[in-house]
Amino acid sequence: MAEFNTSVKDQGDVSIVYLNGYLDAHTASVLENNFSELISKDKYKIVVNFKDLQYISSAGLGVFMAFIEKIRENNGDIKLTSMSDKVYNIFDLLGFPLLYEIYRSEEEAVKKFEEIKKLEK
Amino acid sequence: MNLSFRLKHNIKLQLFLASAGILLLYKLFFFTEGSFFSRFFNEAIVFFTLLFMTSYANDVFSEKKITPLSLVMNLGILSAVIFIAVLFSDTLLPLLFGKITDTLKNPDLFFTFISFLYVLFFGAVVSYSFLILKELYFLKRKKTGSIYFNTMILFFLLASAATILNLFPDLSYIRNTFFIISIILIIVNSIKISWIAFITKKEKLSLLPLSVFICVLFFVNLFGSSEDNSHYQMLTGFSSALAQFYSIIMLYGGIYFAVLFFTTLFHIPTAEAFDRKAQEVSSLQYFSRLITRVLDFNELTETVTDIALKVTTADAAWIAWKYDDLLKPIAQKNIGFVDAELINNYLFKRKNFTEPSSSYTESLLKFDKKEQLNEQYTSVIVEPIKTHNEVRGYLVLTKKDDFIFDEEDKSVIDTFSDYASVAIENAHLLEESIEKERLEKELDVAREIQRKILPAKDPVYEKLSVSSVFIPAFEVGGDYYDFFEIDDNNEPSKFGFVIADVSGKGISAAFIMAEIKGIFESLSKTIERPKEILIKANQILKRSLDRRNFVSAAYGIIDFKREVVSIARAGHCPLLLVRDGKIDNIKPAGIGLGLNYGNRFNLSLEEIEVNLKENDMIVLYTDGITEAKNIDMEDFGETKFEQILLENSTKTPDEISNEVIKEISQFSKHNTQHDDITLVIFKWKSQTEKDLKNLKTGEKEWQNSTPQLKTRVM
């Protein structure tokens, strides 16, 4: 079975989740746990880095849908970055660019969060 | 009971009755006969009568299940019966017959008869007492005859028989010698009472006063019969040997119970330890039997803690079981959940906690929250439960009030937890295999649902050739496609089609499929714009779709009259238009169904219209095709897919789809199919031979038509 794992890094009040491997119906729970934990710690500013993700299935996409509402209610967001063309294509087909902010690099996404923070002040 | 046994049994009874009859007759005629020979004859008949009676009773004995305490109780009752009988006869006999010694010299019929019954009664009681003493002797011993015991019986008989020699006072030393040897043998045989070790402490405690009481009764019975009491005179007068035997047995009983008292007394201090060991052994035996029977995990953990308390001196027990790396208390025994959790957290949630893989004991003196406990537990013993060398949890036992766990406790719990680990592992393996079977059943159901949902066969039209292929993955992938015909005056005027892929897999995906089939089936009848249909479908799905589920779909309608196909797409793979040796993606914008239920979805949807030309091919597929993997986990890919379509574009849709499937299976032959594969190919033939051949609608003859002939517009 294909492997999947994640790691989480905090940068300021933004949490960056790194995905690695194959995200499908069998491994989706790993990412789900990551999101649940972040939410339980009131961390709603989340950047997901797809740099090392090989593949994402529909069940993997469902994980983002499961949490986005709760996160946005708390003035947070999930921003997606660094996708390979193949992974981006999957997101694109489903219309995710209309629903999520997708950036080329992690820095851009983090910067976006910081800009919003400045505006709020 | 087999026949030969019953026969023997009956013969014994008959022999007894016969000898008793002879005895009675003899006594009727020769009661007062005093010669040595007649005395000998008398004693011999008495002996045989008792022998047959005893052996008859012995058979009855061996059939019953006996426990030491019931034997003791029986003896107690017997000695009490003798005591009361002696008491009665001492007062009653003189009233009836005056001085017995005088009556014996001139007995009448009534006296002979009464004394016969009297002797028979005492003979029976004494023999029975002897039998019980014998059973007690052989209890928890090998049944092979003991030389000491047999010798003792021999001397009992010799001592009894020697009473015949009372006629010759010079020879009384023989009788006395036999009697003394009998006493010595009684003492020797009474010393080793091995069954005492096997009874519980409680039984031992009740045995103490009982043995004193019975001992006293036997001695009273022994010494209460002397030369000048009627009972003794009666027995001696009838048979001096029996009187002697009576004395010997009373002595035996007295000595045996005196010894029993002291033996029990000496066993009392070790009784508890012995009880505990016995309890351990029987609990472990019980537990190992249970392992094969109890397979439910919860029931098993309850049993484990239950038995753990029985085999140790602990006050409370629970299991700290690992759930997602957290050790939570389950199956608490004699302790509230709150207490168990407090101690549990103290034991396993410390910063420097590392999983111990062997047992250890710990004092709770340093436990900072011990004031919060309802009961003051002072020490714990923690025993890992391992399966496949992996720690799955811990058995925790705790004690109150300054008692600590000793080495013996620890070794018992070590053994016990090994048993528990095996049992729990068994339960888990079974659960896993049941779960696996359940999943397979579930997938069977899901595949069956899917099979019934998908169209049974491809529709056939004059202008449109349809070919569809569906290959399910082992885990149902949630692919769905369908065709809808829209009739106008009984003529097919429009043709609707849908392809969709439900997120997720298995039975849940199959249920969503069933639902969207219903939605599209009904919408196709009322709405004739693909975009409207998808918007409506999205609204309906809002009510039922879980947040993390969504459906990618594409819906199209072919208008046979206008020769136009209109297509809307909600997140699905683009449709392919194969025309003049080139491939175009038909990819109207649109978000997947269920990803957004607001205006964003509605606004995102586009609808594209394509005018259909001769030999145009429209290809619908799901990502099962492009994402089919080879052994190196590479995708089959769009490029390869399109290439095959182009190379075969002149063939019929059936032939083309065969070609595609062939290539895919070739590509991914060393890898399993992860997702459903769906491929639908439409080929447009506006020119048919219908005018020439006057063929009926719905036949596939268009394939041979010549392009020059233009069909009548439907």
Image: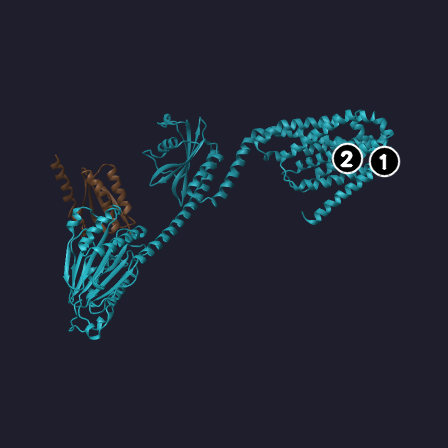
Q: Which chain is mark 2 on?
A: B
Query: On the picture, is B144 further left or further right than B498?
Result: right
Using the rendered view, name the quadrant where residue B209 is placed: top right
Query: On the picture, is B424 further left or further right than B125?
Result: left
Residue B245: % across, % down = 76, 33
Query: Can see residue B159?
Result: no
Residue B469: % across, % down = 27, 62
- Who is closer to the viewer here, B343 or B590? B590
Q: Which chain is cyan?
A: B
Query: On the picture, is B281 further left or further right than B208?
Result: left
Q: Which chain is brown?
A: A
Label number found at residue B56? none
The residue at 29%/45% (across/down) is: A29
Label number found at residue B28? 1
Render colour scheme? by chain
- Are marks 1 and 2 in one subunit? yes
Q: Quadrant of the C terminus of chain B?
A: bottom left
Residue annotated with mark 2: B120
State the SS at label 2: helix
Give the amino acid at mark 1. Answer: Leu
State the SS at label 1: helix
The residue at 15%/73% (across/down) is: B708
Q: Which chain is mark 1 on?
A: B
Q: Residues within 10 Å of mark 2 (few under 14, many from 20)?
A: some
Q: Residues within 10 Å of mark 1 (few under 14, many from 20)?
A: some
Query: Can see residue B7?
Result: yes
